[in-house]
Image (cartoon, grey):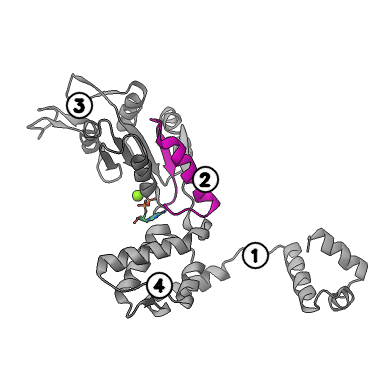
Amino acid sequence: MFARSPGMREAIGLAERVSSTDSNVLITGESGAGKDVLASWIHWKSPRAAQSLVKIDCATLPGELLEAELFGYERGAFTGASEAKPGRFEAAQKGTVVLDEIAHLSTDAQAKLLRVIETREFERLGGRKTIKLDARLIVLTNVDLAGAVKAGRFREDLLYRLDVIHIRVPPLRERKDDLSKLIEHFVQHYAAKHGRKVERVAAPALALLQAYDYPGNARELANIIERAVIVAHGKRLEEEDLPQGLSAAVSAQKNKAKPLSLAELEAAYIAETLAATKGNKTECARILGISRKNLYEKIARYKL
Ligand SMILES: Nc1ncnc2c1ncn2[C@@H]1O[C@H](COP(=O)(O)OP(=O)(O)O)[C@@H](O)[C@H]1O
Ligand SMILES: [Mg+2]
């Protein structure tokens, strides 16, 4: 895991401290930010690392199928259950269960999960034998669960149970300090995967990659680099190897930049004029059309 940025360092620091415990962990963050990667990292760092890591995406299976998948079922539990089958919770014994996109759990499944968390026990669908759960639970979501609770789509008591340790993975645009390491990592990874000799990124291409905001986060960066590595000619990734829309997107981003307040605009203009006059206050005040005293006041106010 690469973490130079304060936000990511905090996330990994917390992940490290929690890894040695059995505590439930809630990881939130935008899609593609690295929640899955962090969940696996916690597992590999934990005393459960030698046991299985079981991941289930709650968004891809409809209600009953998901329950059958999680809890398993006995023969005859429902039409088509011609044989008993253990669920993923059983497969994860002594290991870690990662529930991705937890906000998609049906009301029914939420109730069952709550019971599993509270009692550490469950039964297969249609089964009477109670099974003890010995697995660490990590849940992931890119949805604001508190909002889902307010909207009546998510159980508040379940959220409280899940929210014991909450790790926030910041979006990539808020941790650009991590970009260069991530780019280097993806270049090496995809060069090896596709048998290419690409070793580095040319300065103009790097500048463009640094400027972009990545609404799709690390996943989008990975895709951009993979494609660039494939189309690149030599040992260097060039600007032309990046997607055509990238530089247009960067320009659009700049135009959308947050508008300045009058005070911010004034401060910026005074700073610029001071630089242009090499710090000569008399000359600067003359250009700005204000008194020297007034200029000194503004310099103090704006901490220029
Ligand atoms: N810190 C990281 N180091 C290396 N690869 C990362 C990192 N963060 C994300 N990735 C890569 O970005 C992609 C998306 O990450 P993932 O964990 O699946 O995001 P999420 O679960 O938040 O949608 C994956 O291909 C993963 O390999
Ligand atoms: Mg994911």
Report, in whole angstroms, how far the alpha carbon at label 3 lies from the one at label 1: 57 Å
- Which of disc 4 and disc 2 is earlier in sequence? 2
Real-space Cα separation, disc 2 to disc 4, in angstroms: 29 Å
Residue that mark 3 sits on: 124
At horizontal 33% and vertical 72% (from top left) the residue drawn is: 229
The kind of secondary structure element at disc 3 is: loop
Q: Quadrant of the C terminus?
A: bottom right
Relative placement, left or right, of 87 versus 95 is left
Q: Amino acid at mark 1?
A: Pro
| Identity, as a three-letter code, of the amino acid under mark 4 | Arg
Q: Residue at x 42, y 78 (%)?
A: 239
Amino acid type assigned to the residue bearing label 2 in the image: Glu
Q: Residues within 10 Å of mark 2 (few under 14, many from 20)?
A: some
Residue at the extreme left of the image, as rendered: 82
Q: Is residue 12 magenta?
A: yes
Distance, label 2 to label 3, CA atoms, is: 39 Å
Where is mark 2, residue-wise?
10
Camera-side mark, 2 or 3 = 2
Give the secondary structure at mark 2: helix
Q: Which mark is residue 259?
A: 1
Q: Position of residue 192 (x, y in %)?
A: 28, 66
Q: Amino acid at mark 3?
A: Arg
Q: Which mark is residue 163?
A: none
